[in-house]
Amino acid sequence: MTPDEPQHAAAPFTTPEMATIEAEIALVRRQLVATVDELAGRLTPRAQAQAARETARRLVSDATSPDAAPEARDHARKVLAGAAVGLVLVTTLVAVRVARRR
């Protein structure tokens, strides 16, 4: 025993209220761990790629399906048109940069 240690170890003091609070804290901690694990799973590159594929498929389906709601069809067509314009813009910029280097 070192001089800094107490001579007698006291039994921990607890009440039913303290036990209830500790149980609630343990429950919240487990829920927090589960939430963090779920978020980490959603943020993996594989999960992100899968979500992007599903979104793209849904947009193409909405844009081309006569059964899609008119609002969904219009939205999908606007998003796909914007993506096409962005792709053309990026391709043009890359082509211009390559041409200037020569």
Image (cartoon, rainbow, N blue to C red):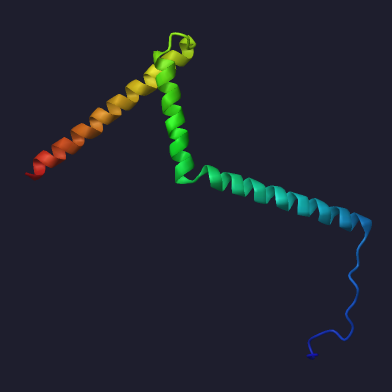
Q: Is residue 93 left or right of residue 22?
A: left
Foreground residue among 2 and 52: 52
Q: Position of residue 27 (x, y in %)?
A: 77, 50
Q: How many marks?
A: 0
Residue at image location 91% in from the left, 73% down from the top:
11
**Looking at the figure, which quarter contains the N terminus?**
bottom right
Image spot of residue 21 (x, y percent):
84, 54
Near-viewer residue (9 or 61)? 61
Q: Position of residue 99 (x, y in %)?
A: 10, 39
Judge from the rendering whether residue 28 lies leftward or rightward of residue 69; answer left or right.
Answer: right
State left or right for residue 29 relative to residue 49: right
- Name the residue located 87 percent from the left edge and 53 percent from the top edge: 20
Residue at the spot 40% in from the left edge and 16% down from the top edge: 63
Residue reaching furthest right?
A: 16
Residue nearest the viewer, comparing 84 with 53? 53
- Quadrant for residue 75, please give it: top left
Which image quadrant for residue 74?
top left
Q: Position of residue 14 (x, y in %)?
A: 91, 63
- As displayed, is residue 18 above or below residue 1? above
Locate the C terminus and report the quarter of the image it occupies.
Answer: top left
Task: State the residue at coordinates (19%, 32%).
Answer: 92
